[in-house]
Amino acid sequence: MLLREYIERDLKQQWGAAGFAAAALLRLAPTNPQEVRAGALPPVSSEDLELVDKLVLFGRLLQSA
């Protein structure tokens, strides 16, 4: 999956958006809870989750317009 690849590259390059990408992955694709506990994904902040939720809502509003 592209988001997983991006997260891996982001962490290596220290771009700083891995948490946001992980939040998107958690919201858009069912993720195995064991994967999260095992540290396969970087920590996700509540701000990242909130921003992803707002972007999803915005996209839905655009679709319905």
Image (cartoon, grey):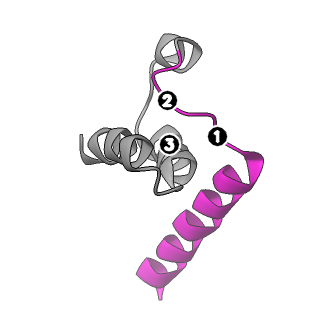
Which element carries disc 1, helix, strand or loop?
loop
Residue 25's spot in the image, x, y percent?
44, 43
Measure the alpha-carbon separation of dots 1 and 3. Answer: 6 Å
Query: Relative to residue 58, is residue 20 depicted above or below?
Result: above
Of the image marks 1 and 3, the number of the one nearer the N terminus: 3
Query: Which mark, residue 22?
Result: 3
Measure the alpha-carbon separation of dots 2 and 1. Answer: 8 Å
Amino acid beneath label 2: Leu
Q: Residue at x 45, y 22 (%)?
A: 40
Residue 41's spot in the image, x, y percent?
49, 29
Would residue 58 appear left or right of 64 to someone viewing this image? right
Q: Residue at x 44, y 46 (%)?
A: 28
Measure the alpha-carbon separation of dots 2 and 3. Answer: 6 Å
Q: Which residue is mark 1?
A: 44
Q: Residue at x 40, y 49 (%)?
A: 10
Query: Relative to residue 51, is residue 32 depicted above or below?
Result: above
Which element carries disc 2, helix, strand or loop?
loop
Residue 46's spot in the image, x, y percent?
75, 47
* Magenta region: 39-65
Q: Which residue is mark 2?
A: 41
Contact (Cβ within 8 Å) of mark 1 with mark 3 = yes
Would residue 27 appear left or right of 50 to someone viewing this image? left
Answer few, some or many: residues within 10 Å of disc 2's Cα (few below 14, many 20 plus, some between 14 and 19). many
Query: Which mark, residue 57?
Result: none
Answer few, some or many: residues within 10 Å of disc 3's Cα (few below 14, many 20 plus, some between 14 and 19). many
Contact (Cβ within 8 Å) of mark 2 with mark 1 = yes
